[in-house]
Image (tube, rainbow, N blue to C red):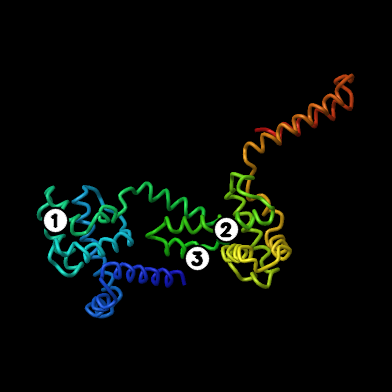
Amino acid sequence: MTKTIKKLENVSLTIDKLKALTKNNEESMAVFRDCRLDVDEITTYVEDVIYGLQEVHSIIYNHKADKVYIDNLIKCKDYYYNKGYLEWGTANFIDATYELFDVVIQNAGEGMKPIVESVLGESFIDLFNTDTTVDVDLQREVSGELWNFIEEDDDESHYLFLSKFNDDLISLRDLLDDYTVKLVDVHKYVYGYDNSMFSTVYGDNIAMIKHYYFKNRHKSNILKNSSFMTAIGFLHEAITNKIWSRESILELVNMLFEDEFEGLTDFKVNEFNQFHQEVCNFYNELQDMLAHGYGIDTPENEVLHKVDKLFSRHVTL
């Protein structure tokens, strides 16, 4: 099953790249026909064109080009059809790519850089990822955050998400951020918070809330087979568009997330300082009440000692 899904993902990616290289659907279909509708042959053809751009990019900018960004590939193609063909003289973007490859590898002088950029536009500079460290860090960050939103051990869903956004991890990160914002909006609605009342959203607590959701979703006929992100979107829409009453939303939230939902956010530092000061004042009053006039071995002093240990553990900045 996983191999079949992976193959389909690769085919989908090849089609996306082909669309990025061709002017319109008619041109894409012409390439399909030339390749006899053979998926492997189409893949080879597309990768050959991108390899040519990769070599040109590496020579022009003096580095080893890595993964192509489809959005920038589309921008390069669009620029070519709008302006670049006037500079280069070839009507077809793919043919122009082959010609540029032949010229650049034979003449790698400085004079080729402005010519290539005038043909393909400034997007050609960013066509390939040039900072592999940043890319690896982003992939690690997004891959880890993704587990906060999908069921534990659901390797297939995790793989599908990463495959779908393989060439645009930033969009996946933005998607997860969007669901985080929606989750916080639900949280604020349930507990009557506003943005001034907290400063931190805990990723670990998102994972915990998700855990309780998958544990409890069967209790709801509406969401019993839904993903965690679907549930977040549903609750957010119900609140935003006033589809359900507040009582119904609170009941559903309590059913799905139990008490863990309350721990999603944290107090702002200044509010915690105020709380800490109030506790210190209470402790000082308690000390005056219990310790005054008693020796260190009295039961009252022992109570004070226990309170002191408790406060030291839980009320420390």
Residue 279 in the image: x percent, y percent? 75, 33
Pointer 1 residue: 104
Callout 1 secondary element: helix
Q: Mark 2 Cα within 10 Å, few/some/many (few <14, many 20+)?
A: some
Residue 192 in the image: x percent, y percent? 68, 52
- Amino acid marked by disc 2: Lys
Callout 3 secondary element: helix
Up the image or down, 25 lies above or below 290; here it is below
Q: Is residue 134 left or right of residue 273?
A: left
Callout 2 secondary element: helix
Q: CA distance from mark 1 to mark 3?
A: 43 Å
Up the image or down, 1 lies above or below 313; here it is below
Residue 142 in the image: x percent, y percent? 47, 54
Residue 156 in the image: x percent, y percent? 50, 65
Write the residue at 35% across / 71% down: 11
Q: Mark 3 Cα within 10 Å, few/some/many (few <14, many 20+)?
A: few
Q: CA distance from mark 1 to mark 2?
A: 50 Å
- Amino acid marked by disc 1: Val
Front residue of 178 and 7: 178
**Closer to viewer: mark 2 or mark 3:** 2
The dot on residue 156 is 3
Front residue of 79 and 96: 79
Instruction: Say which label, 1 or 2, has the lower sequence index.
Output: 1
The dot on residue 229 is none
Front residue of 69 and 82: 82
- Amino acid marked by disc 3: Glu
Q: CA distance from mark 2 to mark 3?
A: 25 Å
Pointer 2 residue: 182
**Closer to viewer: mark 1 or mark 3:** 1
